[in-house]
Structure formats: structure tokens, C-alpha cells
Image (cartoon, rainbow, N blue to C red):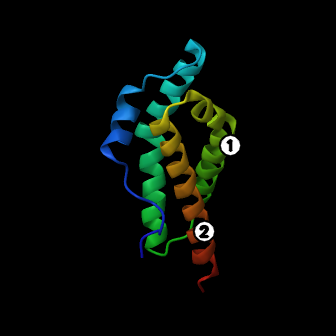
Amino acid sequence: MPLRHWQEPRQADINLIKKGSNMNGSDKDKGMIEVILERMGKQRLPRLIKIRDNLNNNQKLTDYDIEFLEEVFCDTQDNHHLAKDSGDEDLQIMFVKVVDLYKDIIDRAAKNEAIK
């Protein structure tokens, strides 16, 4: 059963990850956003999707999965202001999708732990 809220990235999301975007703000913020987008596209999103797929097959989170999810959560908390303040709607939507995916992963993981 697929997670209810997650939708595969739209082409606009993929382009945003690959190229960055035209955002208002300081060069430092733009640089941080580019790094976050690159990390999201190459490391985080593929791993989150793999975790989601494993959970959909009734697997449980590994210690490595939990450590990874904690890192993603902390980084998202630390950097959400960059998306919020950027004025870039595509970036904001992508952050919301990642948070929603994270929530769905946690919800599904809890259900899988309850399965005996």
C-alpha cells in the first residue's frame, strides 16, 4: 500500500534540484540553498524513497535508517527558513513535500513496528 501523501517529484522539482533557482536573498543564502538542493537530489530524496519503499513492504527501520531520518529532520529544522524566506514557490513546495514524506515514513514505521 503506497503512502497516502507522497507524490513523485514533478519535473519542476527535478529541474530545481539540478539547477538551483533564481532567488532573492544574500549570496550566502543562495549558496546554502544550492548545496541543500544538490544534497536533496543526489542523497536525501533517493534514500527517503528507498526507505518508504521498504516500509511499504512491511520492513522495519534499521538503526541506519533512524540515524539518517534524524539527520534529515535536524537539517530540515535548521534550514526551513531558507525556503520560507526565499520567495521561491517551487522551493517552498519541495520542502513541504519532503516534510510530508518524512511524516508518512514515520507514520508507516510506527505501524510496521506494531505488526507482530
Residue drawn 34% across and 40% down?
A: 12
Q: Is residue 103 above or below residue 111?
A: above
Judge from the rendering whether residue 73 lies leftward or rightward of residue 36; answer left or right.
Answer: right
- Number of residues whose C-alpha sits closer than 10 Å to that of mark 1, classed few (under 14), some (14–19) or many (20 or more): few
Mark 2 secondary-structure assignment = helix
Say which amino acid is labelled 1. Answer: Cys
- What mark, if any, has residue 35 been given in the picture? none
* Residue at 59% in and 49% down: 68
Q: Which residue, as the protein is rendered here, is positioned at the far top?
A: 27
Based on the displayed image, in which of its 4 quarters is residue 110 positioned? bottom right
Residue under pointer 1: 74
On-image quarter of the N terminus: bottom left
The crowding category of the residue bearing disc 2, from other C-alpha atoms within 10 Å (few below 14, some 14 to 19, many at least 20), is: few
Residue 73 pos. (x, y %): 64, 47
Q: CA distance from mark 1 to mark 2?
A: 18 Å
Residues under numbered marks 1 and 2 in contact, where contact means CB atoms less than 8 Å apart = no
Q: Label 1, secondary structure: give it.
A: helix
Spot occupied by residue 80 in the image (x, y as percentages of width and height): 63, 38
Image quarter hosting the C terminus:
bottom right
> Is residue 1 left or right of 60 when viewed as pictured?
left
Q: Is residue 89 above or below residue 58?
A: above
| Among numbered discs 1 and 2, the one appearing first in the sequence | 1
Q: Which residue is mark 2?
A: 107
Horizontal and vertical percent position of residue 107: 60, 68
Q: Is residue 25 left or right of residue 58?
A: right
